[in-house]
Amino acid sequence: MSASPPASPLHGQRILLCVGGGIAAYKSLELVRRLREAGAQVQVAMTAGAQQFVTPLSFQALSGQPTRTTLWDDGAEQAMGHLELARWADRVVVAPATADLLARLAHGMADDLVATLCLATEAPLTLCPAMNHRMWRHPATQANVAVLAQRGAQVLGPEDGPLAEGESGPGRLTEPAAIVAALAGAAAPADPGDGALAGLKVVVSAGPTYEDLDPVRYLGNRSSGKMGFAVAASAARRGAEVVLVAGPVSLPTPPGVRRVDVRSAAQMREAVFAAFPADLYIGAAAVADYTPREPAANKIKKSSESLALDLVRTPDILAEVAAQTTHGLKLVVGFAAETEKVAEYARGKLAAKRLDMIVANRVGIADGGFESDTNAMTAYWKDGERAFPSAPKTRLADALVDLIAERLQA
Ligand code: C5P
């Protein structure tokens, strides 16, 4: 008797695909095919611009449903009104999301069928931007994407690489297979965990550190702690004994995790070493690199036009953990938040800090990174790497902990 493969989390999902007017619209045809292969029902709506690139008939052939192109089609409205279509969807995916479409969505416009559907739906929204890289980088587009992400939209891409007009940069539509994987991740039920880390002790650092300047001020950073907390939760679900050394964040303690709250880099170092011996160290905290040489005993007064701070380096907890040999650690994992040359800088840190693995992500883009609930990242080790496409941090944490369990066996 042969077991049938497990159904995709997208099986039976109703996906409304909104296609914007960009050259990448042709890739959305493959997206429809892949979504249907995963068992999803797909209906397609196109902007007027999209129809300049691909015909509604092509989408109709692949989706098996009439393609919707206008608000003013009596026949289509009688079959399923646009508000009904907006309600029908379990998820709305906009691919490609052009600069113009993002602007209209950010401003709540309802000036065509696609914008109206996005405004009328209560289903979660996934945006897959694709455009010229200068249009993507423009502050107007960045602000629009930030607004949409803040309202809860999942933003996938754009990817870096050659663009249709012969230039290169961030602007390529995320590959349909990666979009489907991210949608499946978002639709999947929470990972129930397993015993992959049973019998192991894991120390995780998370969140920012605050370095006090005086009794009322500090130097901090924008780390939310969400990734480290998700990693700690995931390790605990896999049977590990977990100590979570948390910087100042107001997140709930994951079930089964022992939490130690700290404030400064020095306190974090102390708490981490106090938690040893352990089998694994996962340094997800954004530890301050500098701290005031001498915090002022009293509030610093604004008596002069400028103020120079005298800062000294903090201990590099991760490098120190990786360098010691007395605590029986089997694997040391660091994180790297970079604004550019992500792979190069991450591999540099992997070697310089003598880590077993480093997990890198790009920060400073509209979606992903510090304050976001979603992220895309790549794990690097000496002779390998694995990319994790954009997904909620809880899902990424599960995938990362699975990889860590795998590397422990290597
Ligand atoms: O060198 P960089 O700060 O970019 O490296 C980031 C990694 O190093 C993270 O895993 C972070 O937790 C760790 N780190 C540390 N102590 C520091 C600075 C960074 O443990 N003082």
Image: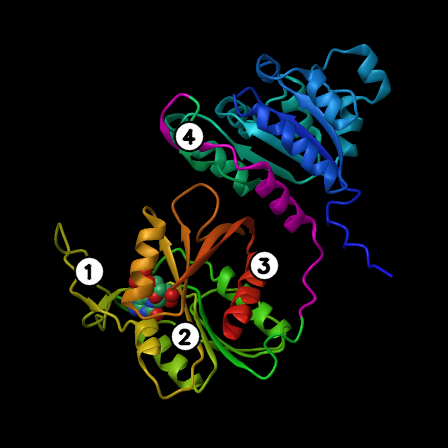
Asked whether mark 4 and ligand 1 are closer than 8 Å, the reply comes as: no
Q: Residue at x 27, y 66 (%)?
A: 352
N-term mark: 1 or 3: 1
**Residue, x 38% and y 72% (percent of image)?**
263
Q: Which residue is mark 4?
A: 136
Q: Secondary structure at mark 2?
A: loop
Question: Which tag is nearer the camera, tag 2 or tag 1?
Answer: 2
Name the amino acid type tagged 1. Lys
- Label 4, residues with CA under 10 Å away: few <14, some 14-19, many ≥20: many
Q: Residue at x 58, y 12 (%)?
A: 52
Q: Nearer the viewer, residue 262 or 217?
A: 262
Distance between mark 4 and mark 2 Cα atoms: 39 Å
Amino acid residing under circle 2: Val
User: Does the closest atom of ligand 1 sit within 8 Å of the Cβ of label 1?
Assistant: no
Q: Of marks 3 and 2, which one's residue comes earlier in the chain?
A: 2
The quarter in which the N terminus is drawn is: bottom right
Rounded to the nearest whole Å, what is the CA distance between mark 4 and mark 1? 43 Å
Label 4 sits on a secondary structure element that is helix
Residue 60 vs residue 410, the one in the foreground: 410
Query: Is residue 79 shown above or below 380?
Result: above
Expressed as whole percent of the image width and height from the top left, the position of residue 126 reads 61, 38
Residue in front for this viewpoint, 356 or 360: 356
Would residue 24 be found to the left or right of residue 191 on screen? left
Residue 302, horizontal then vertical, whole percent? 18, 56
Q: Residue at x 56, y 28 (%)?
A: 96
State which mark lies toward you, 4 or 2.
Answer: 4
Span of residues in magenta = 165-193
> Residue 262's mark?
2
Residue labelled with disc 3? 394
- Residue 9 locus on image (x, y percent): 73, 50
Q: Residues within 10 Å of mark 3 (few under 14, many from 20)?
A: many
Q: Which mark is residue 301?
A: 1
